[in-house]
Image (cartoon, rainbow, N blue to C red):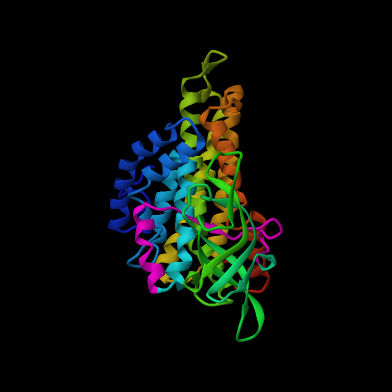
Amino acid sequence: MQLSSDDLPMFFDAEHLALADRLRGARDALESAERAGETEHARDRAAAAALEGLFELVVPLAGKIDTRKLCLAREMLGYVSARADSIFAVQGLGTHPILLAGSAEQRAGLATYARGASIAAFALTEPNAGSDVAAISTTATPTGGGHRLDGDKLFISNATIASHATVFARAIDPRTNAPGLTAFWVSLDLPGVRVIPMAASAPHPIGALELRGVDVPASAMIGQVGQGMKLALGTLDAFRVSVGAAAVGMARRAFDEALAFVTQRTQFGKPLVEQQLVQAHLADMIVDLDAARLLVLRAAHAKDTTGERKTMEVSIAKLGATEAASRVIDRAVQLFGGRGVMVGSIVEHLYRAIRPLRIYEGTSEIQRTIIGRALATGQVNKGAPQ
């Protein structure tokens, strides 16, 4: 990541520039973690350990998330390690509902997550409930001392290394006698919890959760019955723009790798970089890359400085950056030729790693729906004054 006081200074304060220097120093540990261990689980654990000093950015015990700091961190992590980036982001997703509405006891327990001594997960998605959060079917049945959870969660990042997860389930609101989505802070060591590892195209600690008669105390509820939808959407809103930042980091790495390759690779008597069609690819890549980063930083700056949700800007940034990054990385693979599709090459890994970013925390289709609805209903300025 290359950030200095001369690089887009309008978006940053001195503390952000200081963080950029700190992030450069963290790269060596993260790169080592990528090579650690003989198994994927060992690499996951090594990546989590390497993030120890950064988790405070996503678990800010003393205040709210600084979106620009979060984006700077995820851009660096995307550049170095998609695995570490995923663990880092989900640590924030898993703990953020407690920061929004948790009890004093729950908030006090987050200190271990801010240090990185414990890992959290965010258990929202189900086999039949992805983008349609309202379709969640996991139940929370009242018991004498709390609730009993039953259901299945799918595609839960950090599941295989987490100690706790924020689990969303339907509980009966005693005030209305109607079911309402509710969040619970659940130990994954409880009887009835089964973690089933899954294998994604770009390896990271992901799995399914089976919840079969899991008894949780009343103190496990985050906020109130029926507050779960608000907490889920508020959490996703806090982190969504940073998905674009991770995409920028991955795309920047692919661009750097491709530029270095075509500079030293000779074909038809001269370096590839001197071939006009190669130059055209590079031009398209850098335009996509810079546009993506500007969209992300505009949205992050707006969230930080206005204190508002900025849903439109965030959706534009998430959609624009992840789609642009996919194009950049695809072009990088093309420039590498056969080497670009060999397992183990950096651009081949990035080609697999970028794909989930167009799906999680709101698919590209959901972002288009949000943007299109806002335009159709006149919630945003549709153009410059005539």
* Vertical position of residue 59 compared to residue 247: above or below: below
Q: In this view, does 63 lie to the left or right of 100?
A: left
User: Where residue 15 appears, x then y in whole percent?
Assistant: 29, 57
Q: Residue 352 falls in which quadrant of the image? A: top right
Q: Nearer the viewer, residue 274 or 240?
A: 240
Residue at 56% in and 47% down? 206
Please indicate whether residue 163 sits to the left or right of residue 20 in the image. Answer: right
Position of 61 with respect to 41 (left or right) is: left
Q: Which residue is drawn at 42% across and 60% down?
A: 67
Q: Which of 170 and 314 is in front in this view?
A: 170
In the image as oriented, which residue stretches furthest toward the bottom? 175
Q: As drawn, is 173 to the left or to the right of 163?
A: right
* Residue 23 drawn at (x, y percent): 34, 46
Residue that appears at 62% across and 51% down: 359
Q: Which of 14 and 6 is in front in this view?
A: 14
Look at the image and give the residue range highlighted in magenta. 104-133
Magenta segment: does it hold 60? Answer: no
Q: Specify the quadrant of the image occupied by residue 226.
A: bottom right
Q: Does the magenta stretch include residue 106?
A: yes
Q: In this view, does 105 lie above or below 273?
A: below
Q: Which of 138 and 256 is in front in this view?
A: 138
Tell me if I can see residue 380 in this picture. no
Residue lying at the far top of the rendered structure = 269
Q: Residue furthest right?
A: 128
- Residue drawn at 45 percent across, 68 percent down: 98
